[in-house]
C-alpha cells in the first residue's frame, strides 16, 4: 500500500512539474519590449520612429502616419524609403527633425506622407528608415483602413489636406 501511494505521489509530482515548467523558461514574451499600439517603432542612432501605420482610404489614397523623435542636440534629416513590392521601385522621403523635438507625420496639423496604394488592409508594407549612410533600420508597417472609427477620422482629415511640400524623390 505504501509503495502504491509513493508511486502515485511521485507520478503526480512529476506531472505537475512537467506541465508547469513552461512558465519557468527564461524567454517570457510579455517581458520583451514591444509597441503597445497598432503602429510599429524602430530606433536609429538619435532618431526614434514611433507608432507608424500606413492608412489606406476608400478613395484609393495611402498615407504613412507616425512620429519621429530626435534626442540629439542638433537637427537631423531622416530618409524614409518605400519600396513598391510589385516593381521594386524606390521612393525616398526626407524629413528634418529639429533638435530635441518630436515631428508628427500625418496628425497634429502636419501632413502625412502620401503613398501609392499597393498593399491592402491587413498586410504590412516595408519601409527603410535611414539617419545616415550607416545607421538604418527596416520596419514592417501595418496597412489599415477606415474600418475602425479612430482611423476613419484620421483618414477624413488627411483626405482634406494638400501636401505639396512632401513631394517624393524617385530613386533609380
Image (cartoon, helix red, strand yellow):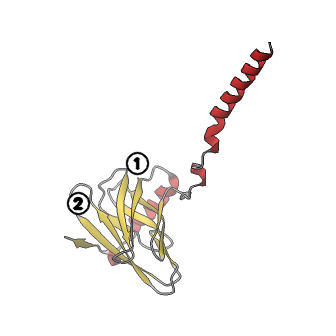
Q: Nearer the viewer, residue 65 or 58?
A: 65
**Secondary element type, mark 2:** loop
- Residue 88 is tagged as 2
Q: Nearer the viewer, residue 132 or 161?
A: 132
Q: Nearer the viewer, residue 126 or 15?
A: 15
- In the rendered image, the residue lying farthest to the bottom is 74
Disc with the residue nearer the chain's start (1 vs 2): 2
**Quadrant position of the C terminus in the picture:** bottom left
- In the rendered image, the residue lying farthest to the right is 2
* Residue 144, percent from left and from top: 42, 53
Residue beneath the point at 59% across and 49% down: 28
Residue beneath the point at 22% across and 63% down: 89
**Quadrant position of the N terminus in the picture:** top right
- In the rendered image, the residue lying farthest to the top is 1
Location of residue 154 with respect to 96 vertically, above or below: above
* Residue 60, percent from left and from top: 32, 56
Residue beneath the point at 67% across and 29% down: 14
Q: Is residue 47 left or right of residue 130?
A: right
Q: State the image quarter where residue 115 is shown.
A: bottom left
Location of residue 100 with respect to 15 vertically, above or below: below
Cα gap from disc 1 to disc 2, whole angstroms: 21 Å
Category of crowding for the residue at label 2, using alpha-carbon neighbours closer than 10 angstroms: few (below 14), some (14–19), many (at least 20): few
Q: State the image quarter where residue 170 is shown.
A: bottom left
* Residue 161, percent from left and from top: 39, 70
Label 1: which residue?
A: 122
Q: Is residue 83 left or right of residue 48?
A: left
- In the rendered image, the residue lying farthest to the left is 172
Residue beneath the point at 52% across and 79% down: 71
Amino acid at each position: 500500500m505504501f509503495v502504491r501511494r509513493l508511486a502515485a505521489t511521485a507520478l503526480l509530482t512529476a506531472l505537475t512539474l512537467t506541465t508547469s515548467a513552461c512558465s519557468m523558461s527564461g524567454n517570457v514574451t510579455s517581458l520583451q519590449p514591444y509597441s503597445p499600439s497598432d503602429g510599429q517603432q524602430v530606433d536609429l542612432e538619435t532618431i526614434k520612429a514611433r507608432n507608424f501605420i500606413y492608412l489606406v482610404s476608400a478613395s484609393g489614397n495611402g498615407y504613412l502616419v507616425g512620429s519621429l523623435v530626435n534626442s540629439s542636440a542638433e537637427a537631423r534629416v531622416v530618409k524614409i524609403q518605400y519600396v513598391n513590392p510589385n516593381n521594386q521601385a524606390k521612393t525616398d522621403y526626407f524629413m528634418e527633425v529639429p533638435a530635441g523635438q518630436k515631428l508628427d507625420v500625418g496628425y497634429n496639423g502636419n501632413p502625412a506622407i502620401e503613398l501609392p496604394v499597393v498593399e491592402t488592409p491587413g498586410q504590412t508594407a516595408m519601409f527603410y528608415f535611414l539617419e545616415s549612410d550607416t545607421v538604418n533600420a527596416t520596419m514592417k508597417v501595418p496597412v489599415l483602413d477606415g474600418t475602425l472609427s479612430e482611423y476613419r477620422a484620421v483618414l477624413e482629415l488627411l483626405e482634406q489636406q494638400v501636401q505639396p511640400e512632401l513631394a517624393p524623390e524617385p530613386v533609380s
